[in-house]
Image (tube, rainbow, N blue to C red):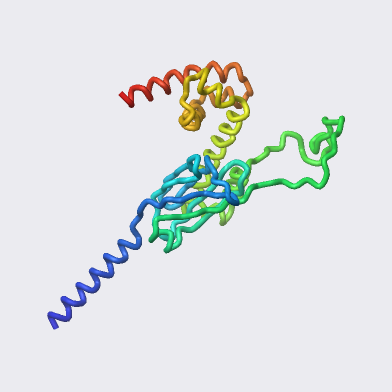
Amino acid sequence: MKNNLIVLFVFLGQCQLLTAQTNGEKIIMGTVFSNTVKLEGISVINCTNKMMAVTDKEGCFSIQAKQGDILNFSGIDYKYLQKYVYKHEFNSGIMEVYMTFNSIELDEVIVNKNANITAENLGIIPRGQIKFTPQERRLYSNSGGIQGLYSFLSGERETLKMNVEIEKKELLLKKLEYMFNDKYYTKTLKIPEELIKGFQYYCVEDSEFVKSLNVKNKTMSMFLMTNLAFVYNQNRTEKTE
């Protein structure tokens, strides 16, 4: 009887060990594609542990996850995507993700001199109506009723809020791409080409700079970027010494 109990305890211990190994997190290496194009700047969020990553120029990312976790993928011009970490992906530690370009097809384009004719001016929609971004709509739709309660209790609401903030930064980064070319960063601000994307992320973390972008004050943006570049380059030099 004693020997049987020992065998039982050993068996249970092995089961617990296997369960712990299965539930344990590890680093997953992934690549994000659209057709055959590798996508840079795609935000990746693990809904379970709230960890975040961003894809590099080769579309690659690494994030800590376990089997069954849900990963959120979002990026400008691409449809929002949620993906499970499947068993074979967890075991191999490798994942490939395919996103769809969010194209808008127009049946016909008409050049109209009466540009002031809008849905608001025609009375189709009320004036001053709040316009939500895709992630803001997702957050708003999960804010009320039973769905809102479930979203709050499950922690999904915090993830949705995080997605809204990420989306805002992505829109700001898109503005930067249109306002300044790479030459401005390398020649004027003395930012190495391979660090331009990192410097842009650094800029959109500054509240004053964000304010200048939102009001489309390019002169102020350039002034603030000069100061930010000085500090960024100084910190970068100190780290390499």
Residue 206 in sight: yes
On the picture, is 204 further left or further right than 111? Answer: left
The residue depicted at 60 percent of the width and 41 percent of the height is 76
Residue 131: percent from the left, percent from the top?
68, 39
Which image quarter holds the N terminus?
bottom left
Residue 149: percent from the left, percent from the top?
52, 53
On the picture, is 35 further left or further right than 187? Answer: right
Nearer to me, 220 or 207:
220
Residue 237: percent from the left, percent from the top?
36, 22
Nearer to me, 236 or 121:
236
Q: How many marks?
A: 0
The residue depicted at 58 percent of the width and 28 percent of the height is 176
In the displayed structure, 35 sits above or below 172; it is: below
Which image quarter holds the C terminus?
top left
In the displayed structure, 88 sits above or below 126; it is: below
Q: Find residue 233 and report its image quarter.
A: top left
Residue 142 in sight: no
Residue found farthest to the right: 113
Residue found farthest to the left: 2
The residue depicted at 57 percent of the width and 43 percent of the height is 75
In the displayed structure, 224 sits above or below 174; it is: above
On the picture, is 203 further left or further right than 102? Answer: left
Residue 92: percent from the left, percent from the top?
39, 59
Residue found farthest to the front: 36
On the picture, is 64 further left or further right than 199? Answer: left
The residue depicted at 57 percent of the width and 47 percent of the height is 37
